[in-house]
Amino acid sequence: MLTRSRFCLLIFSAISLAVFPLGQPLSAADAAKPLKVCLISGSIEYKSNESLDAFQTFLESNYPVKCSRAFIVGEDINKLPGLENLDTCEVVLLFTRRLKISGDELEKLKNYCQSGRPLVGVRTASHALQNWLDLDKEVLGGNYHGHYSSDPETEIKIVESGKSHPVLSGFTPFRSAASLYKNEGLATDNELLLTGTIPEHTEAIAWTRMHKGGRVFYTSLGHPQDFTEASFRRLLVNALFWTAGRPIPIK
């Protein structure tokens, strides 16, 4: 007789194999543990501390997630306390802007990003570290070179070839107050998911790629108003679970 618990385990295994064909699927025991997310914040211009503080509350209140933090203090872009959490997290959400950390802090963050471990980059992660701007091309697969005027709202569109990607599960396009980033010349192995359009210009604004065997997601969205959009929060939740190799929550 098929018990309820056995039935649930079979369903979980089937979903894991379908959604995560790379490598070995998680065991039921591992998948039941909270996803360990390290939130790294240091984008003063976009109020990342405030946005990620609220996002942490949202994550931990609605999903099996446990967050740790590495947040800058005040406006000191030379220090990033909390990076010891990289040793125990499963996935990083990176949202900093032109930080000038050095020494052990810089090496710890570089080592994580270069190791092939799961990474979600938000907005100014494309220029997260002023003394390691190559992070954008080497790891994120981007090519940030400025942005357009912030006056027109950005119309978000799903790329036809990306409609079935797990990261877009439950995502509905919206209009963003974030200025459109210039990102022509992306890495050729990127899988484009979203574009952003303003009058006379269209740019890539979200994609995934593999880096040294690990999953990476990046989006140039991340304006404070974006974090108030349920669809944007859903996008980030999906990205965190997908890059970590976890089944994406249905809700």
Image (cartoon, grey):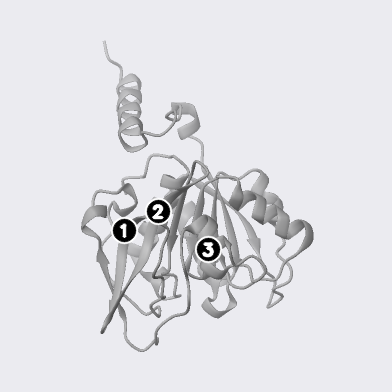
Q: Residue at x 37, y 62 (%)?
A: 206
The answer to whether residue 173 of the structure is visible from this angle is: no
Q: The N terminus appears in which quarter of the rendering?
A: top left
| Residue type of the residue flagged with mark 3 | Asp
| Residue type of the residue flagged with mark 1 | Leu
Q: Residue at x 69, y 73 (%)?
A: 77
Instruction: Name, please, the residue furthest toward the left.
Output: 160
Instruction: Name, please, the residue furthest toward the top.
Output: 1
For the residues labelled 1 and 2, say whether their Cβ atoms are less than 8 Å apart: yes
Measured in 3D between alpha carbons, the distance from the residue under mark 2 to the one under mark 3, in whole angstroms, is: 13 Å
Using the image as rendered, state which of residue 117 and residue 135 is in the foreground: 135
Residue behind mark 3: 136
Measured in 3D between alpha carbons, the distance from the residue under mark 3 to the one under mark 1, in whole angstroms, is: 18 Å
Query: First in sequence: mark 3 or mark 1?
Result: 3
Nearer to us: label 3 or label 1? 3
Residue behind mark 2: 208
Residue behind mark 1: 193
